[in-house]
Amino acid sequence: MSTDWKPGTRTGLLTMAEDWNKTLAVKGTGWNVPAAETQELLALTTSAASALDAAKSETTRTPVATARCKTAFDKLSEKMRDVKKRYFYTPPLEDEDFAALGLAPHDATQTPAGEPTAQVTVETYLVGRHELGIKIVYISGSPGDPANKGYRVWYAVVDHGETPPATPDAIHESFFTQRKNDVAHFKYEDSGKTAYFAVQVENSGGKKGPWGPMVSAVIP
């Protein structure tokens, strides 16, 4: 997929994301965009804006702030790509809709996404407070397969004494990434709890491959 549609600067990407949020607030329901998707995009936009301010400020500009800014914009970019592929070219958008979103009309001829069959899991590592790094590890299949466009990372946070998920189907929170190394962010109060992860390969059409085995790690 070409990235020509995406602005080349963080400020440009942030402006585009803000325009998407405004448009989805008005037309998202009519385009069958789930509320959870619009809420996640809005949250990632807000997070990216805050991270950019911190990275540019003379008082808070540090290597950590710069790294967090990069992570925030990577996540925002991946979410925008996901929303674009899933929802923007499915409903009958008008020319004015494409203009509002900052996109060109879509070529109606699509290349089949392919059925994802690879099985993957994750290895976790410490990054910082309330953050766990995750590394995608292939159990079967090849990362070069065109069907393996991204990864749906499912996770659950379990406190001491709570019953952990017995199977991946019992995990309900997730995020999408196209990176083989990413960072899972948790809330302040999650420190010391256990995070359980399970991953599925996900193609550009939203089809998912088989579950990988669950792994767990204590949230720092």
Image: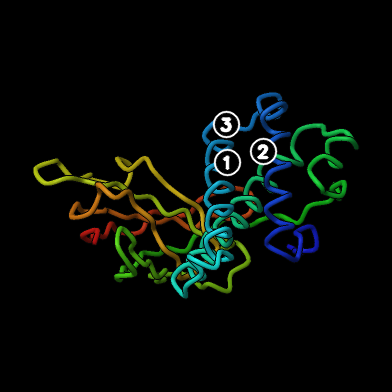
Residue 91 left/right relative to 175: right
Residue carrying label 2: 21
Q: Quadrant of residue 3?
A: bottom right
Q: Position of residue 61 (x, y in %)?
A: 51, 69
Q: Are marks 1 and 2 in contact (CB under 8 Å)?
A: yes
Q: Earlier along the polypeptide chain: callout 2 or callout 3?
A: 2
Residue carrying label 1: 42
Q: Earlier along the polypeptide chain: callout 3 or callout 1?
A: 3
Closer-to-camera residue (174/190): 190
Which residue extends farthest right? 95
Residue carrying label 3: 34
Which residue extends farthest left? 161
Indicate the quadrant containing the C terminus: top left, top right, bottom left or bottom right.
Answer: bottom left
Q: Position of residue 151 (x, y in %)?
A: 49, 58
Closer-to-camera residue (141/88): 88
Alpha-carbon distance for marks 1 and 2?
Answer: 6 Å
Q: Amino acid at mark 3?
A: Pro
Indicate the quadrant containing the N terminus: top left, top right, bottom left or bottom right.
Answer: bottom right
Residue 197 left/right relative to 58: left
Closer-to-camera residue (121/21): 21
- Rendered view: 40 above or below 204: above
Badge 3 marks a residue whose secondary structure is: loop
Badge 2 marks a residue whose secondary structure is: helix
Task: Assess disc 2: are there few (<14), some (14-19) or many (≥20) residues with their C-alpha within 10 Å of its C-alpha.
Answer: some
Q: Position of residue 96 (x, y in %)?
A: 89, 35
- Rendered view: 106 above or below 65: above
Q: Amino acid at mark 1?
A: Leu
Task: Assess disc 1: are there few (<14), some (14-19) or many (≥20) residues with their C-alpha within 10 Å of its C-alpha.
Answer: many
